[in-house]
């Protein structure tokens, strides 16, 4: 995990050492861990409520008492997720205004060009894959899709949790709308994570950088070519401290 | 030795013969109803005395009962013209002078003689044994109704002639509920118009095995009772009512909750609203009636029965038994419109994109493995 010094690289070592680059900070990795935990528990306690007629749901919700317990767990982990989202937003805004965090996650026109190039590649119209920056358009799509998805789920969930309070200020019609939105969005998000996200991080290639925090030089050069060139070519000083772009 | 054997054998044979004879006689016993023998004339014999209007008897507790039987009433009942006469029910009285009366009270007399009904109507009699009324009797209430209280004794007539007679009969004891029912949309149509479609008491409560309507089980099944008419398209079309109310209720928050309880825990008490919680039980009115609990002007106070802190916007959260509609439920309409295209779009996008990636990666792998 330690960055290699010039000295190590110049001496001949019996061990093949590979340079690694920091991709995520420890805090970001903790945030992802909390996200996994809360989303998993929310899906496990939410889906049985949505599909109450199904046999597997009745195995989980076996009594009225169990139902209220499951709802309580759902609420507790919803609070955890909301706290994590608020922390994420405040941290992002503060760090970005102090220029300690790059805006690499924001979508750009380059992402559209990359996506078009990727589609041509997938349809055998070209042999050239697009070269990506720190986050490729697939990763940005994952982030923003779940960003807004969780936003919708949190808002509609709070409306369903406190319908009497909410309708003091807002029209009553939003309650059944929130019910429909919460129910649909949860399934969309779940399937999206399973199909899109799991394919990209588990099956296409095992990408554990969100847990280890680092990408190997090989991975960075292959999958984030633009970012690799930026880190290695721009300034020689980056070679000494390849600490990522944050 | 041989003589005692012979005596025993004779005793056995004669005993068996006597038993067979007794069984045969019992089988042909005149106590059974004689619908096939209308020529029987005991009725005329009994009426020889009992047609006197002032004939009466004082029971040991001081109650006086009239022993007068109006011949006109008898002949207009269902039994007498069918040849079922006095002794079919009064099995203990075979001749004059009658045997001594053992009953202390008038009610004791009724409760004893009504047992005769089961001779011909065993199925309905057995049903009554499972009823709420039988439970009341078991608990010591001598006034709990027996067959003759509802159907009459000497004046038994076919029920439901007219149909309102059923509810009027129940109302003799359940007078307060009957008052409410009379003012309801159902009761009003029954009593005033003799409407053949509206429910009478027994349509919802059952006939002979009437159950306690205050149990969790009755409550959880009660929307099905309403649905037996209100989900009937032809019947509802006759009155310009929507027959989808039950299906739409089942999709609502209340209805989903109820259906889970109904399927899994039917005897557990549940608090989600059923039809009667909002529309009233015996006093339901047309939604357009200003006095109706679900009239828009009264809806909020009806919601507040369960949601006491509900604000004025709260009723907007109730979509009524209406399909999603741009005018009535705009928020729901746009949400549904969004997800009906967004959900399949995202799912197909993910599946197609990932599928293309798998194909491309596989082709690339095969190419690189080729020489």
Image (spheres, rainbow, N blue to C red):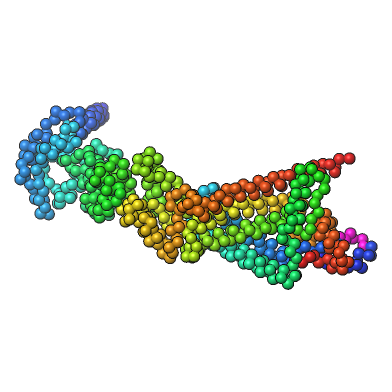
- Looking at the rendering, in which quadrant would you find the C terminus of chain B? top right
Q: Residue at x 51, y 48 (%)?
A: A53
Give the residue at the far bottom of this rendering.
A98
Q: Residue at x 78, y 59 (%)?
A: A134
- Looking at the rendering, in which quadrant would you find the N terminus of chain B? top left
Q: Residue at x 8, y 35 (%)?
A: B45
The question of residue A15 being in magenta is answered with yes
Count of numbered labels shown in the rendering: 0
Q: Which residues are magenta?
A: A13-18
Q: Nearer the viewer, residue A169 or A9?
A: A169
Position of residue A201 in the picture relative to residue B343 (left or right): right
Residue A57 lies, with reference to residue A96, above or below; the image says above
> Residue A81 at what x, y percent from top left?
62, 63
> Residue B35 at what x, y percent from top left?
20, 31
The question of residue A133 being in magenta is answered with no
> Residue B117 is drawn in which quadrant?
top left
Position of residue B72 in the picture relative to residue A37 (left or right): left
Residue B15 lies, with reference to residue B308, above or below; the image says above
Position of residue B254 in the picture relative to residue B366 (left or right): left
> Residue B223 at what x, y percent from top left?
40, 48
Q: Nearer the viewer, residue B174 or A187?
A: A187
Q: Nearer the viewer, residue B6 or A127?
A: A127
Q: Residue at x 46, y 57 (%)?
A: B317
The dominant secondary structure in magenta is loop
Position of residue A173 in the picture relative to residue B216 (left or right): right
> Residue A188 at what x, y percent from top left?
62, 52
């Amino acid at each position: 995990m330690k960055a290699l010094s010039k000295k190590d690289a110049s001496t001949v070592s019996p061990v093949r050492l590979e340079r690694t680059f920091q991709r995520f900070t420890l805090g970001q990795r903790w945030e992802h861990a909390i996200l996994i935990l809360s989303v998993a528990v929310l899906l496990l306690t939410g889906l049985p409520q949505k599909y109450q007629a199904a046999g597997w749901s009745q195995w989980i919700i076996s009594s009225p008492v169990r139902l209220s317990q499951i709802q309580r767990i759902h609420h507790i982990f919803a609070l955890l997720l909301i706290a994590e989202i608020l922390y994420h937003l405040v941290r992002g805004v503060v760090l970005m205004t102090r220029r300690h965090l790059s805006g690499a996650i924001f979508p750009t026109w380059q992402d559209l060009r990359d996506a078009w190039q990727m589609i041509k590649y997938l349809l055998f119209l070209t042999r050239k894959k697009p070269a990506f920056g720190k986050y490729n358009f697939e990763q940005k799509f994952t982030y923003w899709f779940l960003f807004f998805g969780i936003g919708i789920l949190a808002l509609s969930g709070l409306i369903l949790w406190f319908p009497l309070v909410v309708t003091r200020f807002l029209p009553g019609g939003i309650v059944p709308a929130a019910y429909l939105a919460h129910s649909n969005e949860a399934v969309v998000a779940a399937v999206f994570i399973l199909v899109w996200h799991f394919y990209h991080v588990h099956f296409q290639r095992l990408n554990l950088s969100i847990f280890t925090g680092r990408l190997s030089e090989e991975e960075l050069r292959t999958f984030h070519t633009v970012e690799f060139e930026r880190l290695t070519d721009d300034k020689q000083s980056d070679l000494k401290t390849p600490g990522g772009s944050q | 030795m041989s003589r005692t054997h012979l005596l025993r054998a004779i005793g056995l044979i004669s005993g068996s013969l006597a038993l067979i004879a007794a069984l045969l006689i019992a089988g042909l016993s005149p106590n059974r109803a004689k619908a096939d023998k209308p020529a029987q004339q005991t009725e005329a014999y009994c009426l020889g005395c009992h047609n006197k209007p002032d004939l009466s008897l004082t029971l040991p507790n001081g109650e006086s009962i009239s022993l007068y039987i109006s011949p006109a009433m008898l002949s207009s009942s269902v039994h007498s013209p069918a040849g079922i006469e006095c002794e079919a029910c009064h099995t203990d009285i075979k001749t004059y002078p009658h045997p001594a009366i053992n009953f202390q009270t008038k009610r004791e007399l009724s409760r004893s003689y009504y047992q005769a009904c089961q001779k011909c109507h065993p199925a309905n009699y057995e049903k009554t044994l499972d009823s709420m009324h039988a439970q009341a009797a078991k608990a010591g209430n001598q006034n709990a109704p027996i067959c003759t209280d509802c159907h009459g004794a000497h004046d038994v007539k076919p029920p439901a002639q007219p149909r309102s007679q059923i509810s009027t009969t129940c109302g003799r004891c359940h007078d307060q509920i009957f008052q409410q029912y009379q003012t309801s949309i159902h009761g009003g149509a029954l009593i005033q118009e003799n409407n053949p479609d509206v429910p009478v008491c027994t349509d919802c409560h059952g006939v002979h095995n009437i159950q306690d309507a205050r149990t969790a089980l009755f409550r959880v099944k009660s929307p099905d009772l309403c649905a037996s008419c209100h989900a009937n398209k032809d019947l509802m079309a006759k009155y310009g009512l929507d027959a989808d109310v039950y299906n739409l209720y089942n999709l609502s928050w209340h209805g989903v909750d109820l259906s889970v309880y109904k399927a899994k825990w039917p005897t557990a008490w549940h608090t989600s609203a059923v039809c009667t919680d909002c529309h009233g039980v015996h006093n339901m009115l047309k939604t357009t009636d200003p006095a109706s609990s679900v009239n828009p002007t009264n809806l909020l106070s009806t919601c507040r029965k369960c949601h006491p802190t509900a604000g004025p916007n709260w009723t907007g959260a109730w979509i009524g038994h209406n399909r999603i509609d741009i005018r009535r439920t705009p928020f729901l309409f746009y949400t549904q419109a969004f997800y009906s295209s967004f959900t399949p779009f995202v799912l197909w996008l993910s599946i197609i994109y990932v599928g293309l990636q798998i194909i491309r990666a596989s082709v690339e792998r095969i190419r690189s493995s080729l020489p």
